[in-house]
Image (cartoon, rainbow, N blue to C red):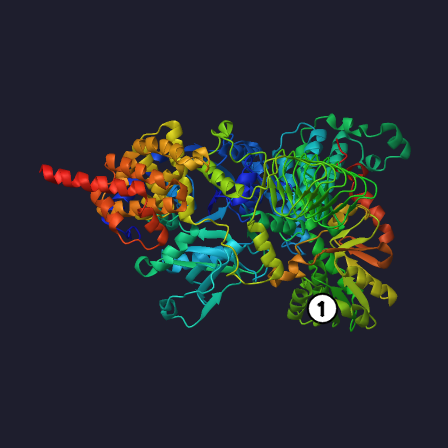
Amino acid sequence: MKSITCYLFNSEFQTIYRVTFHFSHQALLPLANVSMIDYTLEFLTSTGVQETFVFCCWMASKIKEHLQKSKWCRPTSPNVVHVITSDLYRSLGDVLRDVDTKALVRSDFLLVYGDVVSNIDISQALQEHKQRRNMDKNVSVMTMIVKESPPGHKTRCEDDDIIIAMDGKSKRILHYQRAQALKRLHFPMNIFHSGSDEFEIRFDLLDCHISICSPQVAELFTDNFDYQTKNDFVRGLLVNEEILGNQIHMHVTKDGYGARVSNLLMYDTVSSDTIRRWVYPITPEANFADQEGQSCTHSRHNVYRETGVSLGHGSQMEENVLIGRNTMIGANCTISNTVIGANCVIGDNVTLDRAYIWNRVHIADDVKVKQSVICDNVEVKHRVVLNEQCVLAYNVVVGPDITLPEGTVLSMHHPDEEDDEDDDEFLSDDNDVGYRKDKTKQKGINGDTMFPGLVLNADPESDSESEVSEGSHDLGSHPASPELDDVKVFQNEVHGTLQRGLDENISCDNLVLEINSLKYAYNISLKEVMQILIRVVLEFPFHQQGAQISTAQYSSHLLPLLKKWAPVFKNYVKRPQDQLDCLASMEGVFLERETHWAALVKVLMSMYQLEILEEEGIMHWFNQGSTTDKSQQLRRNQGLLKFIQWLQEAEESSEGDE
Amino acid sequence: MTRRRFLSGSASVQAFRRLDQLTILARNQRFTETPVKMPGADKETDLSERIESFLSELKRCGSGAGSLRGSAETARETTALLRRITAQARWGNAGELMEIIRKEGRRMTAAQPSETTVGNMVRRVLKIIREEYARSRGSSEETDQQESLHKLLTSGGSSEDNFRQHFAHLKANVIEAINELLTELEGTTDNISMQALEHIHSNEVIMTIGRSRTVEAFLKDAARKRKFHVIVAECAPFCQGHEMATSLCKEDIETTVIPDAAIFAVMSRVNKVIIGTQTVLANGGLRAVNGTHTLALAAKHHSTPLIVCAPMFKLSPQFPNEEDTFHKFVSPHEVLPFTEGEILSKVNAHCPVFDYVPPELITLFISNIGGNAPSYIYRLMSELYHPEDHELYTGK
C-alpha cells in the first residue's frame, strides 16, 4: 500500500493560548478529555497513513512523553510515529525546509496541523490528486481539502476566512486570499483568461488544514526561503504560476468534519461538536486513544459518563455533558453543554453551562460558570460567578464571593516574572512572545491585587463570538484581527533578542545574525529592520525600568547600551540614506515621549561619537523641512540647537585645519 | 525548472539571504531525532498486528447506518482471525487457549459494541474448544453441555480447572471445528434463501424496510419461481431502501419505494412483512434498523405476519435492558447537514441507528437451520453458546 507521510506540527499560538496554557502544549490540551494530538493521529491512521512525523519545537519533551505512552507507539500500531524536535521550527516553512534537507519524503504526503480534528474520508481527494499527478507530471503540487460551510457557520474561524477563485471543472485554484476584514477584494484579471469557461468564486469554504502534498512542496519551500506559512506558499505559487508552472488544486467535501482548534472559540466549538457526535466515529465513548480506564458510556441527550462518576441528589445532566472518571458532583447542580475532566469535585447548587473543566478541579457550592475554560488543579471557592469567556489557568484559586466579568483571564504565571525555572523548557523566542502579549494585556489590569488578574479589552474570542451571534458582516467596524502583523511581532522578537543578548552577553556578531534571520522569518525590509532596531533600543530602558523613569536615568541607562551595541548599528547604518532613516525613526520615538526630549541630544552625541551617525547626516536631517508642529518644536529644543551649533563649528574647524 | 529562484530586492538583500540560509543549515546540525523503538520482529508480532488492524477496522466501520461490510463478512473475518489466534498463539492446554480467546474477544467486542456478531463468534469458538476438549478427554459432549442444576451448584465456576489437561491433537481438532464453522457461515445466506419458496407465494405483496443482504437474497430466490410485489420503506435518513429497490428491480421484481411515514397507510395491502435485523436478542426481540419498530407495530395492528430473516450468527445472549451499548448514535450529518450553517449552534440533532422490536410483535424467525418462533430463541441460545460464555467480561 502507498506510504503517505504526514507532518504535524504545532503552530504558533493565539494570544490567550500561549499565556494561559503556559504549562501545557496546545496539542496536549484535552478536548473532550482526550489530548488534541490523539484526534489528529487517529484521523491520520484512519486514512491509512502508515508513517507520521510529528514536528514540534515547543515543549517537545512533553509531547514525546505523551506519544510514547499512547497507543501510537506500541509496536502493533499501524501508524509509525516519529517525533522530530528542534528549537528552530517556528513556522511551517522551517519544518518543510527541514523535511527537504533530511529528504524524509519521496512520495506524496499529507500535511496537517497537530490540532486538527477530523473524520473526513480523503480517499477520493487522494485519488484525484494521483490522477492529476499522472496526467501532468509535476504540475499539480498540492491538493487542499476544504469543507463547505456557509458564512455564519459556528465552525468557521474568522482568521481562516478565505476567498477562493477556482476553475469549476478542474478544481484548480486561481486565486486565494484571506478575507480578514477586507471590504474590497481584488481579483487579477489574468485568472479569467486561463481558457476555462467555468469559474467559481467561493466564500463558503472552510480550510480544514489538511493538504495532500507532493514531495515538490518541500523543495519549493527550500527554494523560496521567505515562505513561512501555507498562506505564503499558496499565494507565492499562484503569483509565480506562469513561471514555475505549478498548480494547486482543491477538493471540496460536503461530508465529514474537519476543523482546526486554533483559538479558544474554536476550542469551544469543536468540543461541543465532538460531544454532539459530529466527528463520529471519533466520539468520547469510542475510547479511540485506547487509554486504560477511559471507558465511557453514552446515554440519551449525549450524556457521557466515565467510570466512578457520582452525582448528588437532584443534580441534572441536561444535555451534551461529558464527565470524567471519579468526578464527584454535589446536589442540585444543573449541568449542560459541559465537559468535566477526571477527579474533579463539584459542590452543591452549581450551575455549569458551556464550561470546559479539566482535571482535578475543585468547585465549591453555589458557583455559576458560563462558557469558560477552567484548567487543571484550579480551585473555585463558593459563590463565584464566572461570566462568558473566562479562563482560569493552572493552579489558580478564585473566590469566595466574587463575580468575574466577561473575558477575564486569570493566570498564576505573572507576566512580569522571569520564569527562570522554565527557561530550559521553553524556547526563548516563545517566551518573548509571551511577555509581549502579557504586556499588551497589562494595560487592562483593573487594580485587582488578589491575584494576577488580566482583563482583555479586545478578546479575540468575544469578537468572533459576537460576530457569529449577530450574524453581522460589518467587518470594517471590527477591531483588527487578533493575529499580529509581522512588523509588530518582529519588533518584539528583536526586543527579546537584545534582552537575551544583554543577559547572556552574546556577541554583537551573533545578534546581527539573529536579527537577520528574524528579518527573513517575518519578511521585513532592511529599512524597516533598522527603524525597528532603533525604536527597540531607544525604548529599551522604559521596558527595563518602567515608563516613569526620569530623563537623567533614561540616558544613563541608554548610553552604555548604545555603546555596547554599536557594531550592530554599524552593520545596518551604512549609507547616507540609512542614516536619515535612522534619524527619522529616532525622531519618531522621541515625538511620542515629549518629556525625554533632553535625552535626544545625548543619544545623538553618543551615536556621533560612536561613528554610527555622521555630521552630514545629522545636519541633513535637521535642515529637512519638518511637517508637523511637534517635530518643529523638537527641532527648537535648546539642547539640540546647541548640539547642531557644536557640530557646525566642529565641521568648520576641521575644514579650517585642512 | 523548479529549482530556479525568484528573488526580489537589492544585491545586498540577496547576499543576506544566502548568508542566512547557511546559518539555518548549520543550525540544523543541532536537530535531535528520536525514532520510536521497535522490538524485534516476532512471530507473535504478525498476529498482534493482524488483531490490531482488525480492531481499528471494526472501530471505524459503520460511519453510516449499515456498515460498509455486511455482518456476515464480519462474522467470517472474526472467525478466521480466531482460527489464526488458535494456530499461532502460545498455549499449552484448552484453558489457556480459552483465556487468550476471551481476552482478545473482549477487546474486539469493546472496539465496536454495536457489532454483536463479533462477540457471538467468540462465544461460538469458546464453545467449540469446550466440546473438543471434552471429546479429547473421552466424555461425550452431551453430558458436558447439559450440566444438571446440582452439578452447577457444586462445581460453581471452577469447571475451568478441568481444562488444564494437555492433548497433542487438540489444536488440530479445534482448527478443524472452526473450519466447519466457517463453512457453515459461508452457507448461511443460501440456506436462508432456500426456504423462500415456503414463505412467499404468487401475487403476494411483501413489505420490507431498508436494505438487508439476507432479505435481498431471500426475495431474489423466490422471484426465480414466483411473481410478487415488494414494497420497500426507504428507511430515512440513510435511505438504504433506495439501494434495495434498485437491486430488486434488476431481478425483475415489481418494487415500490415508500417513505417511512407511509408504512401504516400501506400496511393494509400487505400480505407479509419480511425484514432483516442487526441482532436477535436473547429474549427473542430484535435490534434492527431505525423504523422497524414502527413497521412491526403497524404489522401487528393489521395482523400481518412479520417474518425476520436472521442467520444464526446474529443470535446474541444480550438482553435489551443493557441500555448503554444498545443504542448507537452516529453523526447527525444526515439529519441536518453540516453545511446548514447558523442553525447548527441552536439545535441539537440526533441520529440514532437502531430500534428495539419486542418479541411479541414477531411472528417467525427464519434462520439457516429453519424457522423458529421467538419463544424458541432461548433454546437455540443454549445450543449455540455455553452459559459460562454469555458474559465475556466476567470471565477471569
Q: Chain for mark 1?
A: B
Between A181 and A303, the one nearer to me in the picture: A181
Per the image, the residue denoted by label 1 is B223
Q: Is residue A13 left or right of residue B238?
A: left
Between B103 and A90, the one nearer to me in the picture: A90
Q: Where residue A104 sits: x, y (%)?
A: 40, 41
The correct choice, above or below, for A565 with respect to B338 in the image is: above
Mark 1 neighbour class, 10 Å CA radius: few under 14, some 14 to 19, many 20 or more: many
- Quadrant of the rendering where the C terminus of chain A is positioned: top left
Residue sitting at the far front? A638
Q: Where residue A524 sits: x, y (%)?
A: 35, 48
Residue A118 in sight here? no
Q: Is residue A273 left or right of residue A233?
A: right
Residue sitting at the far left? A658
The image quarter in which residue A29 lies: top right
The correct choice, above or below, for A543 with respect to A217 in the image is: above
- Residue at horizontal 63 percent and vertical 41 percent from the top: B81
| SS state under label 1 | helix
Residue flagged by tag 1: what amino acid is it?
Ala
Q: Where residue B59 sits: x, y (%)?
A: 63, 46
The correct choice, above or below, for B313 with respect to A392 in the image is: below
The image quarter in which residue A508 lies: top left
Q: Where residue A372 sits: x, y (%)?
A: 65, 45
Q: Is residue A300 left or right of residue A252?
A: right
Residue A25 in sight here? yes
Between A403 and A418, the one nearer to me in the picture: A403
- Residue at horizontal 49 percent and vertical 54 percent from the top: A480
